[in-house]
Each structure stands twice: as C-alpha cells, then as structure tokens.
Image (cartoon, rainbow, N blue to C red):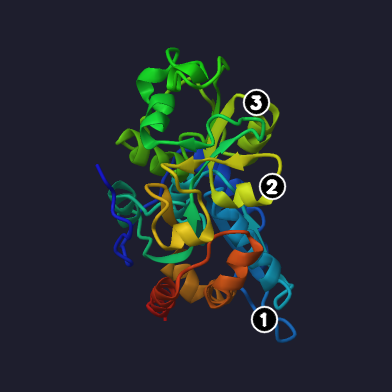
C-alpha cells in the first residue's frame, strides 16, 4: 500500500500510549524539561526546552537548526534523539515530544493514533533527500545498479540465498555480500523497501540493522563487499569513506533530487509540530519559526538537498497555518 506523501495537516487526538518504550523515552526526554519548560522569558530572552525525536536522516537538519538558533536564544535547550521515524511518531502521538523528525510522511495508522490521543499537528517539509545506496570505495564493479538488482539484493526471499555479488550479476566478482541498513523503526527502511521491494518493511532478515546510520557508514567503510542505504547527507559528510552508487545511470545529487531524475529514491523530509505545544510554549514556536525561515541555510550546513522555491513556499504556508 502506498502511503500519501502529505498527510492532512491538522489531526485531533485524545489519550496516551502506555508502552514501556514510550515510558523510557518520556523519562529520557522529560528529564530535561524541568521548571523552565514553559519558555518564560528572562532578561528579554527565551528559556525552556524543545524536545525532538525521530529520523536519523532528519536529525542533522534539526542539529544544524539548533546550532544556529542557540546563537540567538542561548537559554533554550533543544534535545534531539534519534529513535527512528516510526518510534518518533509513537512518542509524538503520546504527547511526549514537541517535534517529530520524519523521513517519510505520517501513515494513516499513525494519524489514527494521534487522532485517538488528542494531539493536533502540522506537517512541514524542511528539505529533500536522495536516499543513497552506499558502497565501499574499493568496490569498482557495482557503481551503477538497477532497481532490479537492488531487489535481488534486498528482497525478503534473498535471505540466506543471495550472499555473493556474482549472484547479483555474473559479471560481478566472487565477493561476499555484507549488508547494512536501518532498523525496523526507520522511515528510511519504509521508503526504500516500498520503492525497491514494492512493500514497506519487506526486506531480507539477514542484514546488520541499526537505527544509527553511523553504524552503516562504519560497516561499509570497513568491508570491500559491503552495501547499505541511508540519507545523502551521510555520504556528503563521509566523503572518501563511502561512495554512493548510481541507480539506473543517475547519481544522487542536489540537481538530480530536485529535478526528480534520481528515481525512485528521491524523497521530501519533514518535521511534525504539535499545534498545542507551538501555541503554548514560546520556545517551541520560536524554534520552529526559525527552522522554516532559515531552511535553506540549515540544509546547506547539514549537507542536505535544500527545498526548491515551490517547496519553500509550501513550507512557509504550512507554518502560517499554525498561527
């Protein structure tokens, strides 16, 4: 089932999730809220805490936004965790976080969860990504892969069966496949598997999974026969350690992502903002406003593909709907 790129902006919710994992996140994130969480001004500046969780792909963007923002509001603490898009939505829909970083659009099921818990939200597109298939620099045979070859490598039925590069293409060398990728709570996993295998979450079980994309970077950098997939920003930040394969003759880049020629692995990146917290917490409002107002500079600092002019207008309109 294909999920919509953009969910309805305002969704209603009542209730709260009770899973132990949510409690753990609440303890971790809530510990920093304290008495300053209301964003009271002191000496003309803002204070308090902004809590963001979710995608490891969007985290570098929100990190860059934080670094710029604290230059203007040094008394605001912005806590960012990376549990994955899906886990981030669980915390967000439980009312734990102010902002949810997401590398895919919210699903209908997640909308229903938020709608059942009393959280109204707004979706804001903040950048773009060319989801990248990454190789070791010593790999000189698979620099251009087809979607069909990616399916051969990553299909669920390939587990324990397709274990060597020469099974992907007989012209490839006798070199063991070593696979790295995101964990089950990752929006990157959802997007990649839908594009390559035709179903979100459908993937072979015998790869090395982690919600930390740096694990994929390190693993691919150390193994000549390794392959993984992650956001383009990690390729740009680790030049020389990993390389991105072209897909059907097109390499991921700012140009190919923005013009749509890098297909099917181009995607928008989002933040989801709690309407209530935006209205009630001055520090949240100030940070989100700053994030959108400086979206192009933030993307440049995070080595992420920036919004197009049309997308920037969309983001500004999405932000305006919060006021």
Q: Earlier in the sequence, mark 3 or mark 1?
A: 1
Check whether the beta carbons of the residues at disc 3 and disc 1 lie within 8 A of each other.
no
Name the residue nearer the viewer: 181 or 106: 181
Name the residue nearer the viewer: 32 or 203: 203
**Residue bearing the label numbered 3:** 224
Task: Report x, y in % for residue 281.
Answer: 54, 73
Please, which residue is most extreme toward the bottom here?
44
Residue at coordinates 41% horizontally, 71% vertically from top-left? 311
Q: Horizontal placement of 31 versus 85: left or right?
A: right
Task: Report x, y in % for residue 246.
Answer: 49, 43
**Residue bearing the label numbered 2:** 239
Mark number for residue 41?
1
Q: Horizontal placement of 35 versus 111: left or right?
A: right
Quadrant of the frame with the C terminus: bottom left
Mark number for residue 132?
none
Real-space Cα distance between discs 3 and 2?
A: 16 Å
- How packed mark 1 is, by other alpha carbons closer than 10 Å (few <14, some 14-19, many 20 or more), is some
Query: Can residue 316 be seen?
Result: yes
């Amino acid at each position: 089932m294909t999920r919509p790129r953009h969910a309805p902006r305002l969704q209603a919710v009542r209730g709260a999730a009770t899973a132990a994992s949510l409690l753990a996140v609440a303890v971790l994130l809530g510990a920093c809220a304290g008495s300053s969480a209301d964003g009271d001004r002191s000496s003309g500046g803002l204070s308090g805490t902004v809590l963001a969780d979710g995608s490891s792909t969007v985290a570098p963007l929100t990190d860059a936004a934080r670094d710029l923002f604290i230059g203007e509001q040094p008394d605001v603490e912005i806590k960012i965790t990376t549990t994955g898009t899906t886990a981030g939505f669980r915390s967000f829909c439980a009312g734990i976080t102010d902002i949810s970083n997401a590398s895919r659009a919210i699903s209908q099921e997640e909308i229903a969860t938020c709608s059942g818990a009393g959280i109204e939200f707004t979706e804001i597109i903040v950048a773009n990504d060319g989801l990248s298939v990454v190789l070791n620099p010593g790999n000189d045979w698979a620099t251009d892969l087809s979607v069909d070859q990616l399916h051969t490598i990553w299909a669920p039925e390939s587990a324990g069966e397709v274990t060597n590069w020469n099974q992907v293409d007989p012209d490839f060398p006798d070199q063991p496949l070593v696979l790295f990728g995101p964990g089950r709570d990752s929006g990157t996993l959802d997007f990649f598997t839908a594009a390559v295998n035709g179903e979100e979450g459908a993937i072979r079980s015998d790869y090395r999974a982690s919600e930390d994309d740096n694990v994929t970077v390190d693993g691919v950098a150390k193994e000549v026969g390794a392959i993984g997939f992650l956001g383009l920003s990690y390729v740009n930040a680790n030049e020389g350690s990993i390389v991105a394969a072209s897909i059907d003759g097109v390499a991921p880049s700012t140009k190919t992502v923005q013009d749509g020629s890098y297909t099917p692995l181009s995607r928008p990146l989002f933040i989801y903002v709690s309407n209530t917290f935006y209205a009630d917490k001055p520090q949240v409002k100030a940070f989100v406003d700053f994030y959108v107002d400086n979206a192009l500079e933030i993307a440049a600092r995070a080595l992420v593909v920036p919004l197009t002019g049309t997308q920037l207008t969309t983001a500004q309109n999405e932000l305006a709907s919060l006021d």
